[in-house]
Image (spheres, helix red, strand yellow):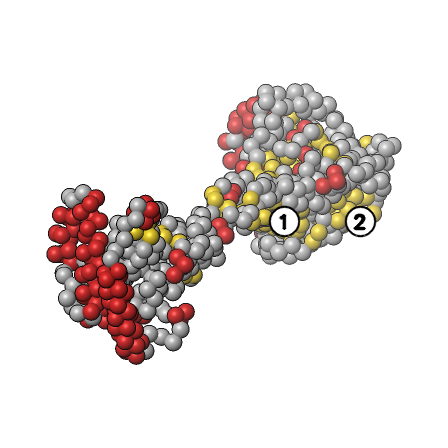
Amino acid sequence: MALYDERTICVCLVCVLCIHMIASQDDWFGPNQEFKCHCESNCSSDGTCQGNGSCARGWFGLKCQHQDLILLDNTTISTNASILTDQDDKSCMDISGQTIVVTFNVSYVFTWMRVALQDMAFLSGFTVQFSKTASMTPEIECANQKYFLVDNSTLDIECDLPDAIRTIIITGTRQTSLCSLYVNGGRNVALKQTTWQTSTYTELGLGVGDASKAVDGNTNSIFSGNSCTHTGITDSKPMWTVNFPLSEITRYVIYNRGEFLMDRLAKFVLTGENSGLQRFYYTDPSDLGLPVYIVIDAAKHSLTQVTINSRLTVFLTLCEVEIYGECPAGTYTTSDLQCTNCPTACPNTCHSDGGSCSVCLGYSNPPACTLVCSTGRFGINCAQTCPSNCFGNICDPETGQCSKCKPGFYGGSCDKVCVESFWGQNCSQNCNSNCQARLCHNINGECIGGCVAGFVSPGCTQACPAGQWGVNCTNSCSVNCYVQSCDKTTGTCDKGCHGFSDPPSCKTECGQSNWGPNCQFNCRNNCFNLSCDSQTGKCDSGCDGFMDPPDCTVECKTGKWGRNCVNQCNFQCKDQSCDRVTGLCDYTCDSLTNLSCPADCPKGYHGSNCTLDCSSTCKDLLCNRLGYCIACVSDYTGRYCEKGLASEASGLTFSSGVGIGVAVGALVIILVDVIIVIICRTRLTTLRPKSNDDLKPATRLQSYDGLKQINEYNHTYEPSRSTFEEKGKSHKKQDGDGNKKEQYENTSNTVYETIG
């Protein structure tokens, strides 16, 4: 029944097969049409891709013959890196600081990978590591790493790994723009190669189940599709073999029939041979059979023949056998997809895909790579120049990263200007905190926006000079500040005020009698009304007892007193000497005891109530309490200056009787005065201080008042001042003769008052 079903299906699909064969003729190229075209569009006869020249998705490399493991089913890549598998080498991403993880659903042998970079100078900007599991933790480093240039932006990276891997970890260590990523899965070296099997099932017709069906490039697993092998009914040890050019094999992919009877392939044995010697052996552990088998050869054995044996059934059916590998070491794949020896420049180490010699990373002599790049050079074959901002033009020969940056820059390539608030080599220095907004020039550290208040540009390290404050020290301290010193930031007076009383603002002036720092000094007594300049202390309203404002250090001259010494001492002061401040006489001429002193009355008067006129011939109208002239005007003499010198010459005389009377009267008056003086002296003992020098102004005034009271007491019969003033007014209207007559009347009155 099974045989009938297979035959029936085959008949139904004959036309379809024919149509498929005709339609797919353009999918092959090569001398014997042995290579399958994997171009995005059609291939030329030599396998060159037509159209845009791109490979179909999942393929890359020479003539698009290398399978890309990343695009196999169930392979995952970091979600942020999907752009790397779009096969567009112009769409790129910056992977600096990122990790790209590729995880396969099964283990694979890693040989090499291809990367497309936006800038080849940043080739060393990432690392490639591996893990044998699906873990993101690296376990295996890329040993014997080699670089092969494909073109100006594409590089193949080769690693020798001891084991198969499941995870590739790519870490961006610095700015690197990665555009595409391909992982080599090898090229199918078994395709259209010579095959053989122990028998062929012929019941379905000629050609059905041939050994070549397993390498026809058709992975259809439905047997009725006429793309699977099938051994004969009587074959007790079915076996299938394929021969191919010598290749390093890394992977076998075996497609079992898929609709049913998969268990026929269970427990199969796969062996690989080279020169008649078995190099590789694998036994399937499954009991039921799998749709697809993937067998890896981590040792990468060089083989020319592979054989598959069935151990459980009389039938061996294979729908496709793909054997992936490379040309063996020392050879490479030519443009016609044949293996040939490496060039003499690198006889043992050329790239398997194209035969290019490896380039040096950090060395200048490929492929030996023994001479380190000279100063200022780095990268592949030392072709790159170190970044311009590297200090001393020194950079890592492999990565191109600067060991140090010129002042003002940072980063691996020193291509980043210092961020705000930093400057200097590697931007390791902080901008001066005195810089406005802490912004400074990235190279020399000079403040860009000026200084904060209190410091001077450009470095802002020097405080404002004395007397200045504010941003860039453009403000002057107030003259109200002591020694014009103020806070460099706020401008407030930091050493107190100068002529003002309210530090630190110093806006309230000193009172009239204070001056100096914070108004702590009193104005000198030398200043009139104790008033002085609030800042200098100099007398601003004049002197009091001194003659040289505003200093007021030179005392009034004798006879002067008061404000700036403009007042004359009283005529009654002895020797015209008085206190320079109060004007009080230093020593008063006592008219009671000394008849040579003027009366204690205004000039021109005498008597107890100062109502009697001094003689008009008294010099300066000064007379004593008795009316005697202190001195006479010119041409007069006598006690009252009543005698004119001209009168004596004319013989004018008083009678002898009158003269004797006057003399006796004068003696009596003198005697009475002596008695009065003795009484007054006794009473004044209690009114005067011991020394005239000790008299204070108030005391002197009291003494004067006391004398005046005594004088008034002894002259109770003198007319009042008001009466005298009226009388005086009438006197002024009389002529000179009348005045002369009045002098004598005054004399008699005075004598009368004294005697009375």
Residue that numbered label 2 is attached to: 278
Image coordinates for residue 298, horizontal then vertical, percent? 72, 50
Residue 274, given in percent of the width and then of the height, sits at 81, 44
* Residue 621: percent from left, percent from top: 29, 52
Q: Secondary structure at mark 1?
A: loop
Q: Nearer the viewer, residue 239 or 469?
A: 469
Q: Quadrant of residue 136?
A: bottom right
- Residue 606 can be seen, yes or no: no
Residue 369 located left or right of residue 150: right
Residue 428 — which label? 1
Tell me which residue sits at (50%, 52%) in the image: 483
The image quadrant that residue 222 belongs to is top right
N-terminal-most mark, 1 or 2: 2
Callout 2: SS: strand
Considering every residue shown, the one lying at the far right of the view is: 344
**Camera-side mark, 1 or 2:** 1
Q: Which amino acid does the dot numbered 1 rest on?
A: Ser
Q: Quarter of the image for the C terminus: give it.
A: bottom left
